[in-house]
Amino acid sequence: MRAGKRQRNSFRAAPPKGPERPSADARRTVQRRGAPAGVWLYGIHAVLAAIANPDRKIVRLIATPELISRFDEALTQARTARGGDLPPLEEVDRQTIDNRLAKGAVHQGIAAEAGALPELGVEDICRNPAPRAAVLVLDQVTDPQNVGAILRTAAGLGAIAVLTPERGAPEATGALAKAASGALERVPLVHVVNLRRALETLKTAGFWCVGLDHTADRTLEQVALPERAALVLGAEGNGLRRLTRETCDLLVAIPIGPAVDSLNVSTAAAIALYEWRRQSRLPAVTVPTTR
């Protein structure tokens, strides 16, 4: 475990100056693969969050009569908030929506064809001046359902971003957006070219990199977590890659009983982020547990 690279009292390092508008150079550090040029979003929470997000271009919006009558007020408010910058709402039957989406997509009667969200780089995240800030970093987590669930946790518990390497990471598709339940519009999903370099960049901005590793000598609650923390999680089963593990400032384990070998990565992310929030003494939040 590499906990000795910096002194513990540097946990409270001064934040970088900011905030500044993201530069074009910073945005170009992210490959476009993680943000498809156009995508069909579906599901009530995912679509309502997208149409409420002024950074998301909506090309087409379709819904069943039942959905429209149920969410007419929310749809009207979204259109008003965007100054009318939404396409006409098309009333269609469920089969029409089924035909637009992948087989088995649970759309709940609404879908939207949308443009990609603006790209961000790790440099943009580092400009956040908050003395208490957490970032979730994913090492080779490929399942869009897991990434979506982690985004939802990030939104609920106050992480400022989720970082993932561009290679092997899921695209920001409708399935991921549905799993995120609207959080994709609220928490930046940042694809980075080189994860180790991204961690080093976070360090220069005052973040400590805390790797979750079941072989670590200390458990999560035994460590005083830094106020600016990058919580680094690996894929279920494989865990953190060697270079990622070596780049972390310290490694901690989540203690579990012998009945299971490991936790799902989205569960581990929720536990780690909750413990960081608890130690940081941030105001309590109530997060709904159902969609």
Image (cartoon, grey):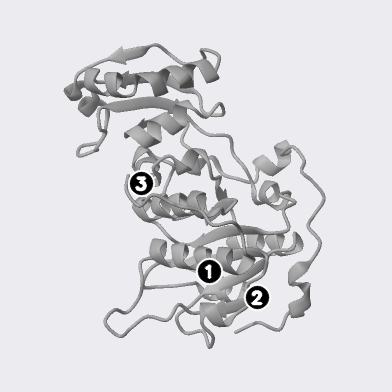
Residue displayed at 54% across by 53% down = 162
Answer few, some or many: residues within 10 Å of disc 3's Cα (few below 14, many 20 plus, some between 14 and 19): many
Residue linked to disc 1: 275
Q: Amino acid at mark 2?
A: Asp
Type of amino acid at the residue the image marks with label 3? Ala
Other-residue count near label 2 (Cα within 10 Å), few / some / many at <14 / 14–19 / ≥20: many
Q: Residue at x 20, y 39 (%)?
A: 104
Closer mark to the observer between disc 2 and disc 3 = 3
What x and y, as percent, mark residue 233? 49, 67
Distance, label 2 to label 3, CA atoms, is: 31 Å
Q: In the visual, does 122 lie left or right of 168?
A: right
Return the residue at label 3. 179
In terms of depth relative to the viewer, which is nearer, 116 or 9?
A: 9
Please name which of the two marks, 2 or 1, marks the residue nearer to the observer. Answer: 1
Q: Quick one: which residue is furthest to the left in this view? A: 95
Q: Position of residue 99 (x, y in %)?
A: 21, 26
The mark closer to the camera, 3 or 1, is 1
